[in-house]
Amino acid sequence: MSTIVRHPAGPKLSDAVEYNGLCYLAGMVASDTTQGIRGQTEQVLAEIDRALALCGSNKSRILTATCYISDMGNKPGMDEAWLAWVDPRNLPARATVQVALGDAQTLIEIMVVAAK
């Protein structure tokens, strides 16, 4: 049986969970929600890099990403930040969905699953 490893396990959730060679990341949001979509997306992508490193993985190992945005009109700005960050030789499967997020200032949340 494979061991489940949680990084860090908090009172509400874990930022990342490792199981059977995969890393499951929680939805990541920006800490500075005064920024626009590009700035918030860049913050989220930096958090993804940090969480993947905890698991011994990196963005080139991402299998799938789900991007939740509050307004589909912001998608071009999100895509600009994404394309500047993503490994172009190892593009993951990705979906972008418009949703109501936790508060009006939060413009984006991203979840990923990556191989170790």
Image (tube, helix red, strand yellow):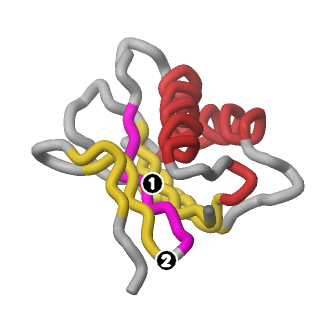
Pick the front one: 96 or 90: 90
Quick one: quadrant of the C terminus? bottom right
Disc 2 crowd rating (10 Å Cα; few below 14, some 14-19, many 20+) is few
Q: Position of residue 27 (x, y in %)?
A: 37, 49
Percent across and percent down for residue 101 are 27, 43
Across and down, in percent, residue 83 comes to 76, 41
Q: Label 1 is placed on what type of residue?
A: Met
In the image, residue 53 sits, relative to residue 23, either above or below, namely above
Left or right of 113? Residue 5 is left
Question: Where does label 1 land, which residue?
Answer: 111
The amino acid type found where label 2 is placed reads: Asn
Is residue 73 visible from the viewing direction of this image?
no
Q: Which residues are magenta?
A: 21-29
Q: Is residue 13 left or right of residue 27?
A: left
Please give left or right for residue 27 compared with residue 49 in the image.
left
Q: Which callout, 2 or 1, points to the residue nearer the camera?
A: 2
Prevailing secondary structure class for the magenta stretch in the rendered image: strand
- Looking at the rendering, which quadrant does residue 45 occupy? top right
> For mark 2, what is the residue?
20
Question: Which residue shows up at 56% across the image and 30% down it?
Answer: 46
**Nearer to us in this view, 95 or 90:** 90
- The residue at the point 68 percent across, 48 percent down is 59
- Residue appearing at x 62%, y 32% in the figure: 77
Secondary element at image label 2: loop
Point out which mark residue 58 bears: none
Establish if 13 lies above or below 33: below
Q: Nearer the viewer, residue 94 or 50?
A: 50
